[in-house]
Image (spheres, grey):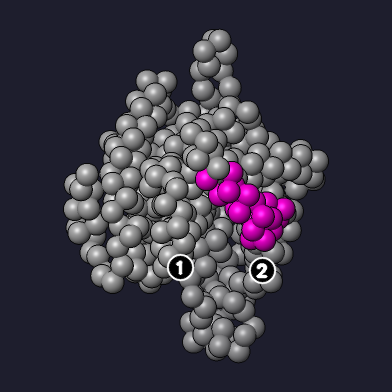
Amino acid sequence: MKKLAKVINMEFRLTVANKVFVILTLFGPFFIAGIAILPGMLLKSSEVINGPVKKIALAGADARFLGEVAPLLKPSGIEVGAVRGNTSSLDSQLRSGAYSGYIIIPGDQGEVSHFEYVSMAAVDFRLSNAIQNVIGRAIVTQRLLKIGIPASRAASFTQPPVFESRRLMQDGKTRKNPDFTTIFMTGLIFAILLYMTVLLYGQGIGRSVLSEKTNKTVEIMLSSVRPMDLLFGKILGKGLASLLQYGIWVAISTVLLKLIGPFFTVPMGIELSLYTFAYLVLFFILAFFLYCSIYAALGAASEDEQHLGQLAWPVVVFLMIPVVMISQVISAPHSPLIVGLSFFPLTAPIIMFLRILMGAARPWEILSSVMLIIIATAALARLSSQIFRVGILMTGKRLKFHEILRLGRYR
């Protein structure tokens, strides 16, 4: 145990004293706060979101119709102007840059069943959606006016009811669910945080083992330390350093968001609760030991940096799957695929964490996921220790993935 403690202490001190560690520790909270604050900053600046004002030509519409849609399109950065002429003349004005695009509305707006927007630029979904919603609603209003419904009531017929989603809590009270944007940004921040830190420390352990192997340092160390102590000493030492870094990130970013968040319309709900941070730390620890055990074994079996990268690509794929599926997890957290991935140990740390953020994971599901990750980590740690013990002294051959697994059979 004394030798293991010395390896842990050495690995911890080497990691903490590294310049990259210090820089990431100091600037990490500002990066986290920046991601959280950015949406609020964009909402306060329509010029940043919408870009320059776009001039749209509206042909064939009467003055009343134009007066109805123009104010509604202006907040989206769209300026509407009435023009006359056929398609050829409108195309000429479009090519000359007088307008960003044009729409032709037939004379009787109440009879319109189809209208299109023509532009020279690539499709702009934000602009297209704004035009479709505003002009589409204005056409429906004209239909209602045509059948005799007063203008004062026509607007209420086209206005959809306000929808609100609420969640029943254990105390019997209901609480408003956060909107999709809030949950998505929260999930994105924490998923990327888990992904980056696990990948960073996992690759760090792999490179550290590979460096000691290629420099022959490990041969000197193994003369006084067992391979098992060396393997777990490295993992535990970097684990302690990563928890120190996480603690600093959480403390500083929480203070930053509490102080400056209200000025930038940062949603301060689920993402700053102790409940959320407790699960973040728990799943980070589980993912850390799971992936670092794999990276340590791969580092011991590798010949150089390029070989390590080739062997580690399946590991990176399993880390990437949850990140690219964030929107699917948030949209359908109860789907069989998402539930299955939340129990699969290599994807569970991020997927289950996102389901917890959504309030979609039951206590028994969380417990089952955690137990499966622990069991998988124990099994992989045992396999990795066997690979590490044999592979750390093997040189001169670039092992393939199935050959590395075969090393785990040696006793």
> Residue 27 appears at what percent x and percent y?
70, 55
The residue located at (60%, 89%) in the rendering is 96
- The question of residue 329 being in magenta is answered with no
- What percent of the width, then of the height, locates residue 19? 67, 61
Q: Is residue 159 visible?
A: no
Residue at the far top: name it: 171
Is 358 displayed left or right of 162 in the figure? Answer: left
Task: Answer with left or right where residue 266 lies relative to residue 213.
Answer: right
Label 1 packing within 10 angstroms: few (<14), some (14-19), many (20+): few
* Residue 34 sits above or below residue 128 on the image: above
Looking at the rendering, in which quadrant would you find the C terminus? top left
Identify residue for label 2: 51
Compared to 230, does 281 lie above or below?
above
Q: Report helix, strand or loop for mark 2.
A: loop
Instruction: Name the residue beneath numbered marker 1.
Output: 215
| Along the viewing direction, whichever of 277 and 55 lies nearer the viewer | 277
Q: Which residues are magenta?
A: 7-27
